[in-house]
Image (tube, rainbow, N blue to C red):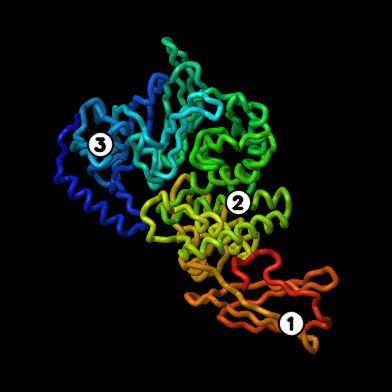
């Protein structure tokens, strides 16, 4: 049953939202005034069926008048989707409609800028909440929202631009263990075989990275890092292996806090889970694929990647899906930076060379830039471009402005956009302010232009002169970049640098003796393809 809405209000509302979205690069229709401040999701789970019952309380601030707004929720169609039995504004029935997988609410006329709405619903989610059995046959419920699948089970603004604090109140059969986004504030046995578990996260989070995990778990507090509890939640059958494999999370967390800035969330739980991804960076409650646990400590890089997301992607989030490299490229490179800190510079080079090959191979089939406005479905924004190439851009930026300014800029960027949202321009602006350099051309060619330098080259030695001839072969754009040249002699390498600012460049180095060999970019600072 749904209440009749004032449709003329919505026509104006939708046109206004469409106008605003034309300025953005993804197609999500944003609420113009309503800003969600807090969600309380009351969920009832059972063992008899996959149907869930929900009561969601959504607290909204109206910034520019109490205009109509919309929440995402996939409606029942066939087996899957949600039926809404009521929407309330405070204690009174709200003026709403439910169509097109949107709950569209017209607030009552009032000067009150802060309102709480309640949505009562039930149904079987097709996605978002994975109701399945673990690899050991135990029934389980796992939130798996990325990128916009929360709408299958949680009425919400299912886009990272609107973050809110969150509380989960989960009623489930008492034999289950429950972990979720936030800090556990209640665990109560209700009788009749039910248990209520409540988690509350005081930091604002995007719906793409909120989660629950409900199954039989073995859990352990691994350590506390600057008063942040770090825990492992694994299947009981994997208890010892999981505690061992996830133990490195404490070291990773400390590295990022020390080098980037404060951690935003109530805890850091590392959870073995049913997920469509290798890892999913849920805020404070990371999900890792089931077979990540084997006792061999082989997932340190993955753990570093997902923990890096707690800063980049979760706390400082992209404001537009097409800028997701600010999440994935950052997590890719900061996982490399962590490994470099542990295993040395050769590890950085090794990881980047693996990524270089993937970037080159990907470009042959997908000649597109990192920020690609032609992509309209957020399910399609993830690629080698947004992960590996985005990471390589950060590596080149680090070399461009130097280690000290790079880290200073990273800390300034995180401080400015912690618990908020940013676009590529925002990151560039901060790095320019810190470095004192104009980085417009750098970002334009590496982020917004497709491809990379394809370099054909040769060298010769004559009359104490080393002659190096360089040519960019790609036709669509002439890249400009610093290029290091390594000259090898008697087991030692000397590095020289030239500025490549044209399609052709001839470079001469005075040398007393003929080199044993000459190599381009011996320290892996430039993304290019050697022809």
Secondary structure under tag 2 reads helix
Vertical order, 260 against 493 (above or below): above
Q: Would you identify the image quadrant in which residue 299 lies?
A: top right
- Between circles 1 and 3, the one closer to the viewer is 1
Secondary structure under tag 3 reads loop
Q: Is residue 307 visible?
A: yes
Front in this rendered view, residue 197 or 373: 373
Q: Tell me the number on the disc at residue 112.
A: 3
- At a point 58% along the width and 29% down the height, the residue shown is 233
* Whole-percent x, y for residue 133 in the image: 49, 27
Position of the N terminus, as image quadrant, is top left
Front in this rendered view, residue 441 or 107: 441
Work out how far the residue at label 2 is from the one at label 3, CA to CA, in angstroms.
44 Å
From the image, tell me which residue sits under label 1.
509
From the image, tell me which residue sits under label 2.
334
Vertical order, 199 against 372 (above or below): above
């Amino acid at each position: 049953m749904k209440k009749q809405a004032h449709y003329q209000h919505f026509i104006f509302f939708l046109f206004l939202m469409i106008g605003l979205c034309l300025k953005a690069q993804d197609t999500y229709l944003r609420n113009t005034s309503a800003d969600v401040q807090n969600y309380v999701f009351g969920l009832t789970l059972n063992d008899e069926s996959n149907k869930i019952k929900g009561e969601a309380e959504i607290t909204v601030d109206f910034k520019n008048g109490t205009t109509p707004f919309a929440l995402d929720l996939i409606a029942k169609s066939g087996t899957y989707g949600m039926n809404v039995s009521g929407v309330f504004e405070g204690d009174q029935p709200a003026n709403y409609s439910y169509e097109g997988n949107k709950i569209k609410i017209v607030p009552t006329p009032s000067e009150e800028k802060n309102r709480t709405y309640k949505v009562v619903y039930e149904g079987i989610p097709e996605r978002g909440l994975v109701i399945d059995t673990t690899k050991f046959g135990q029934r389980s419920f796992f939130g798996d929202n990325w990128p916009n699948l929360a709408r299958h089970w949680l009425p919400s603004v299912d886009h990272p631009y609107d973050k809110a604090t969150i509380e989960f109140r989960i009623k489930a059969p008492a034999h289950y263990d429950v972990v979720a986004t936030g800090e556990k504030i209640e665990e109560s046995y209700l009788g009749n075989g039910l248990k209520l578990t409540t988690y509350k996260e005081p930091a604002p989070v995007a719906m793409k990275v909120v989660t629950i995990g409900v199954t039989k778990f073995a859990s352990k507090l691994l350590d506390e890092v600057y008063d942040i509890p770090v825990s492992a939640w694994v299947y009981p059958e994997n208890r010892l292996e999981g505690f061992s494999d996830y133990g490195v999370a404490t070291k990773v967390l400390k590295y990022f806090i020390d080098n980037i800035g404060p951690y935003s969330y109530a805890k850091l739980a590392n959870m073995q889970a049913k997920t469509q991804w290798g890892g999913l960076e849920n805020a404070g409650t990371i999900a890792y694929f089931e077979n990540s646990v084997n006792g061999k400590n082989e997932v340190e890089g993955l753990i570093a990647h997902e923990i890096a997301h707690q800063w980049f992607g979760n706390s400082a989030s992209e404001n537009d899906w097409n800028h997701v490299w600010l999440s994935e490229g950052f997590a890719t490179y900061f996982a490399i930076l962590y490994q470099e800190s542990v295993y040395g510079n050769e590890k950085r080079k090794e990881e980047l060379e693996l990524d270089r090959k993937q970037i080159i191979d990907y470009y042959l089939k997908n000649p597109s830039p990192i920020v690609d406005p032609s992509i309209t479905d957020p399910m399609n924004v993830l690629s080698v471009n947004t992960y590996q190439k985005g990471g390589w851009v950060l590596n080149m930026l680090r070399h461009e402005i130097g280690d000290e300014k790079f880290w200073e800029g990273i800390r300034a960027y995180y401080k400015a956009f912690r618990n908020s949202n940013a676009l590529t321009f925002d990151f560039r602006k901060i790095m320019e302010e810190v470095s004192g350099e104009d980085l417009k051309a750098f970002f334009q060619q590496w982020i917004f232009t497709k491809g990379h330098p394809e370099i054909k080259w040769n060298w010769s030695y004559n009359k104490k002169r080393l002659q190096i001839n360089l040519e960019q072969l790609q036709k669509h754009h002439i890249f400009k970049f610093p290029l290091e040249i390594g000259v090898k002699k008697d087991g030692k390498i000397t590095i020289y640098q030239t500025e490549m600012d044209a399609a052709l460049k001839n470079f001469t180095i005075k040398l007393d003796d003929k080199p044993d060999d000459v190599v381009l970019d011996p320290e892996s600072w430039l993304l290019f393809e050697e022809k």
